[in-house]
Amino acid sequence: MAVCARLCGVGPARGCRRRGAQREQRREGPADSEPDTDAEEERIEGARLGPGAAPAPAPAPLSLLELPPELLVQIFGSLPGTDLPSLARVCSTFRRILRTDTIWRRRCREEYGVCENLRKLEITGVSCRDVYAKLLHRYRHILGLWQPDIGPYGGLLNVVVDGFFIIGWMYLPPHDPHVDDPMRFKPLFRIHLMERKSATVECMYGHKGPHNGHIQIVKKDEFSTKCNQTDHHRMSGGRQEEFRTWLREEWGRTLEDIFHEHMQELILMKFIYTSQYDNCLTYRRIYLPPSNADDLLKPGLFKGTYGSHGLEIVMLSFHGKKAKGTKITGDPNIPAGQQTVEIDLAHPIQLPDIENLRNFNELSRIVLEVQEQVRREQQEEEEGQDEEEGRSRQGDSQQVEQPAQRDDAGAEGTEAAGAAAVQESAPTSQPFVLPVGVISRNEDYPRTCRMCFYGTGLIAGHGFTSPERTPGIFILFDDDRFGFIWLELKSFSLYSRIKVSFQNAEAPSREAFDEMLKNIQSMTT
């Protein structure tokens, strides 16, 4: 009762009138002659009011235990589910009320979005409390967006609550080169309650239906899956049939339709590498990039064309005067997790007229001039830092402070100039065409653009050997599409926004997102 009193704000600190009076009476008289306080109070009250007078209204309840049970159900149902086990330990009455399924039905709906008719569970003998405690709450840490560790290839997994199931959906880009088509998705695993004892994990990989699987939460922001019946992944026609099926699903074609020999090798290599995992994978959490009102366009996930490697998933994020494109899926040259493009928002590029734009040499000259300007600015900045460090070592504080102020003003001037250039070119739209000789997987690219910026793209040999950043040009077409021309490769990549509402994917903070980017990049470096 002491705990109950504290819950409703009544206790030793405020005093309980009835219990205080009882204690006084115990001190004044012997225990065997203790009067009936309730009867005495009624007699005194009747005498004060007189005969025929209406009694005073009942006093407000002094304890939660005095509230009607149906009101307690409403109160408890509004509390977070994680607080209810502690509440059940207060007393047997609370524990009995917390067995009411209405409370847990509300928690399933408000915390995890389960909107189905939970009364259907009664047929299986599973309660809403079981669903909350043994399924939703137990596996809450794997909800969200994840990247599987599949060597250089990566991937994109969204684990969501889907009715009475928790399902891991693997998202795949559309078939090359249709970058504007919607994403494809397939289930890799599911978790549900078959009976009241515990949740059941099932592997969904292969074509023989769900079968026994296992999920282990390795540590914070990391979990692994394991299939316990990999024979369900095999086909009667052997590896050849498995390869043909995979090729139709992955590329939407047969090997005979692919005439490029190098592309055939890359496809076969990916099948051999990825199929050896048999859905026994480790996943690491990723977040969607945070956005700001002054971003060039809304950050997020995009599908991009990457030559013989097909379509890949790239995350576009903004970092001050820079924008970065990080690979969520990758290839043997540039693996998942690496920064494929970087855009310098402080250096916009004005394209030539449409006729000169067709001339690759003219566009290359413009970009290389900006590259040289960027190189000089970086060199001057480094020299200024060296001079400042030298003066610092000499202990001349006045000489240190003055250059520091000039450097800050210079940096602010550069940012202001870059922002002014962006604002100046933002409202205008100009014709766009790829220069002659630039290769594009998709000829159906936009013929007008809003603005362009200097940028660099990451290229490397097979196995991520000899990586280097090479100059290029970033082209913003509209709110959902952008492109990048790789000068050294004479190649064009077109990117289109992924229009999927991923659940539980927002970063808790900007610092958490930056740390996530650093972690996924370090794993493939």
Image (tube, rainbow, N blue to C red):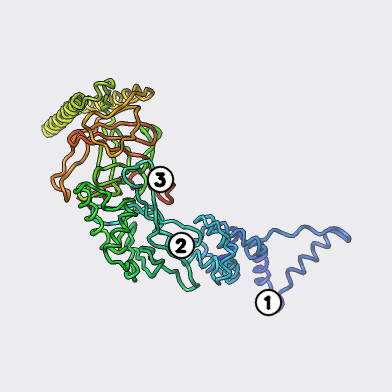
Taking depth in this image into account, of 221 and 64 the one nearest to the observer is 221
- Circle 1 packing at 10 Å, graded few (<14), some (14-19), many (20+), is few
Nearer to us of marks 3 and 2 is 3
Residue 313 % position (x, y): 32, 46
Mark 3 or mark 2: whose residue is earlier in sequence: 2
Residue 354 % position (x, y): 28, 22
Nearer to us of marks 1 and 2 is 2
Residue type at the position of mark 1: Pro
The residue at which mark 2 appears reads as 137
Mark 3 or mark 1: whose residue is earlier in sequence: 1
Q: Quadrant of residue 47?
A: bottom right
Mark 1 or mark 2: whose residue is earlier in sequence: 1
Label 1 close to label 2 by CB (< 8 Å): no
The residue at which mark 1 appears reads as 30
Taking depth in this image into account, of 141 and 405 the one nearest to the observer is 141
Taking depth in this image into account, of 476 and 273 the one nearest to the observer is 273
Give the residue displayed 42% in from the left and 46% down from the top.
Answer: 500
The residue at which mark 3 appears reads as 182
Q: From the viewer's perspective, is 5 left or right of 379?
A: right
Secondary-structure class at tag 1: loop
Secondary-structure class at tag 3: loop
* Cα distance between the residues tagged 3 and 1: 85 Å
Residue 46 % position (x, y): 83, 62
Which residue occupies the extreme bottom position in the image? 32
Q: How many marks?
A: 3
